[in-house]
Image (tube, rainbow, N blue to C red):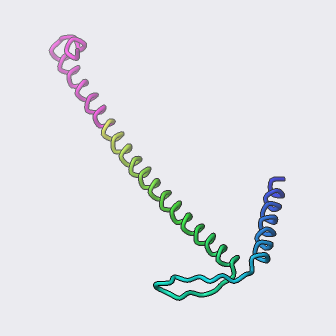
């Protein structure tokens, strides 16, 4: 059902564009007066070219922003991994230190809890 609605939507959009192009065949003068004298083209072609250029620019900007977000996310993941490694190394060092204190206390005959506090 959804596929049918999509196809119907694009068919109606295509028909609207065809009707628009047929009704706007008049030639318009495009000129960049100080730089270039200009040329003539149909109005519908000018508008279609404008829409196409707008879509290209928006696709480029969207891709650029996605890439920027991806690099930030990747950098954050790398930093989180580094910090996790540091935390596990610190926890391991704390465990080794606590075990060494417990051994010393056991060898001297004292209580392990008294020295760790």
Residue 77 image position (x, y, % from top left): 41, 47
Front position in the image: 92 or 37: 37
Which segment did they paint magenta?
Answer: 88-117
Q: Is residue 62 magenta?
A: no
Q: Residue furthest left?
A: 108
Residue at (39%, 47%) from the top-left corner? 76
Q: Quadrant of residue 11?
A: bottom right
Front position in the image: 103 or 93: 93
Q: Is residue 70 above or below residue 97?
A: below
Q: Is residue 44 above or below residue 66?
A: below
Q: Is residue 93 magenta?
A: yes
Residue at (84%, 58%) from the top-left corner? 4
Residue 62 image position (x, y, % from top left): 53, 60
Q: Is residue 52 above or below residue 102?
A: below
Residue 45 image position (x, y, % from top left): 68, 78
Q: Is residue 42 left or right of residue 97?
A: right
Q: Is residue 45 left or right of residue 18?
A: left
Q: Is residue 53 left or right of residue 67?
A: right
Front position in the image: 91 or 64: 64
Considering the image in quadrants, where does the C terminus appear? Answer: top left
- How many labels sit on residues? 0
Assign the magenta stretch its main secondary structure.
Answer: helix
Q: Is residue 55 above or below residue 113?
A: below
Front position in the image: 39 or 70: 39
Q: Quadrant of residue 83?
A: top left
Residue at (42%, 55%) from the top-left corner? 71
Q: Is residue 38 left or right of residue 95?
A: right
Residue at (61%, 72%) from the top-left corner? 50
């Amino acid at each position: 059902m959804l596929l049918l609605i999509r196809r119907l939507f694009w068919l109606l959009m295509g028909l609207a564009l065809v009707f628009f192009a047929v009704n706007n065949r008049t030639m318009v003068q495009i000129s960049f007066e100080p730089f270039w004298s200009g040329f003539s083209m149909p109005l519908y072609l000018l508008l279609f070219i404008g829409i196409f250029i707008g879509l290209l620019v928006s696709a480029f900007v969207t891709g650029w922003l996605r890439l920027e977000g991806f690099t930030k996310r990747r950098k954050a993941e790398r930093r989180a991994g580094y910090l996790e490694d540091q935390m596990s190394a610190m926890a391991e060092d704390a465990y080794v230190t606590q075990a060494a204190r417990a051994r010393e206390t056991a060898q001297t005959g004292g209580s392990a809890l008294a020295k760790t506090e």
